[in-house]
Image: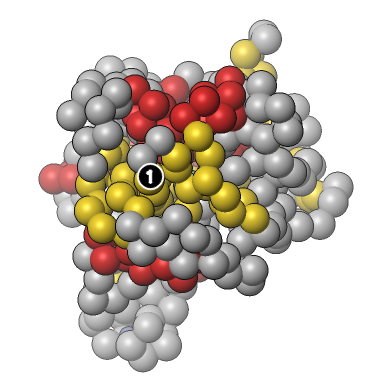
Amino acid sequence: MSVFRLDIGFAGNPLDRLSSARDDAARLAELAGEARARAVAFVQSMPTLRVEGERLSSFHPLATARAFGAIREEILLGRDENGPVFALLLPDDAACSEAPLDAGAFVDQRRLILPAFPKLQIRDLRALASKDALPRAEIAILAQARAILNYHANHRFCAACGAPTRSAQAGWRRDCPACAAKHFPRTDPAVIVNVANRDFCLLGRQKNFPERMYSCLAGFVEAGETFEEAARREVMEEAGIAVGAVAYVASQPWPFPASVMVGCEAEALSREIAMDRAELEDCRWFSRAEVLALLEGRHDQGFFAPGKIAVARTLLEHWLRDDQVRI
Ligand SMILES: [Zn+2]
């Protein structure tokens, strides 16, 4: 396999996760007590940001962030050379929004504020990553934080008995005091597939995509499926294309809310598209020259590929770079 760029969006987390400290109360207290302890603080799934001159930073001194509101959860993310990092979850009502959440929107466009801390900016993580508004390592840490905080926000009750659960292991488990069940955070795998047939590849667009954006087909892996089987099923369901060999290319954390995208390329055994209109708005074959134009933003119909935070782009670049059709 050819070597290709490793700067996949939301990857590159530099933290040592200190998993051996999670069950050690004394060690946790020591980490939180370090003068260099920092926190990222989320409200309504968005990070709070300090403005430092012309730069933004999502890192706050831990003690400062603890004062942002009634902290619902505090999770040890790990440490890097600058010290320990925690993730804090603020209650939803700590923030006011100028506009309601549009659940179907591709990017969360709400402008939130914490009334007591009006200088803090609160922004959607996908938008921050797309705009390179923060260093890559910081974006990766925020991805870790967003996924684990979302788990806590949405899994407050025991799935076995219904009793309220509480955070354990520094936020990496939730325990039920009523029935002793232990619940672990989920990461949901989804496959994303670049389906190729000779010098063409299959791209589609979902209704909620930005206008004229085309991407590789994707879907969640279901119970009892391999990644390869999920790839074949998704492509058949969405586009009616039979797929043969499937090969893994690269993966990425995708904390919207808690996935890992498993990027594959696959060989199409047929060319005739039978699109599922409930899933896709359009689906078509693109030539190599067109894919290059999509990536470079100069397609003659104004079509474009996802930005560099998306592993779909990595898959397309990988395919273009492969002179021999290897699949
Ligand atoms: Zn229970």
For image coordinates 23% across by 21% down, the residue present is 3
Query: Where 103 sits versus 32, above or below?
Result: below
- Residue 42 rendering spot, x and y as whole percentages: 56, 45
| Category of crowding for the residue at label 1, using alpha-carbon neighbours closer than 10 angstroms: few (below 14), some (14–19), many (at least 20) | many
In the displayed structure, does residue 105 sit left or right of residue 254? right
- Specify the farthest residue to the right: 98
Disc 1 residue type (three-letter): Ala
For image coordinates 25% across by 28% down, the residue present is 324
For image coordinates 48% across by 48% down, the residue present is 202
Query: Where 280 sits versus 35, above or below?
Result: below
Image quarter where the C terminus lies is top left
- Residue 132 rendering spot, x and y as whole percentages: 56, 21
> Which secondary structure lies at badge 1?
strand
- Specify the farthest residue to the bottom: 161
Quarter of the image for residue 198 reads: top left
Q: Quadrant of ligand 1?
A: bottom left
For image coordinates 54% across by 67% down, the residue present is 274
Residue 260 in view, yes or no: no
- Residue 143 rendering spot, x and y as whole percentages: 44, 41
Quarter of the image for residue 176 reads: bottom left
User: In the depicted view, which residue is nearer to us: 176 or 219?
Assistant: 219
In the displayed structure, does residue 256 sit left or right of residue 173? right
Image quarter where the N terminus lies is top left
In the displayed structure, does residue 37 sit left or right of residue 107? left
User: In the depicted view, which residue is nearer to us: 177 or 279?
Assistant: 279
Name the residue carrying label 1: 196
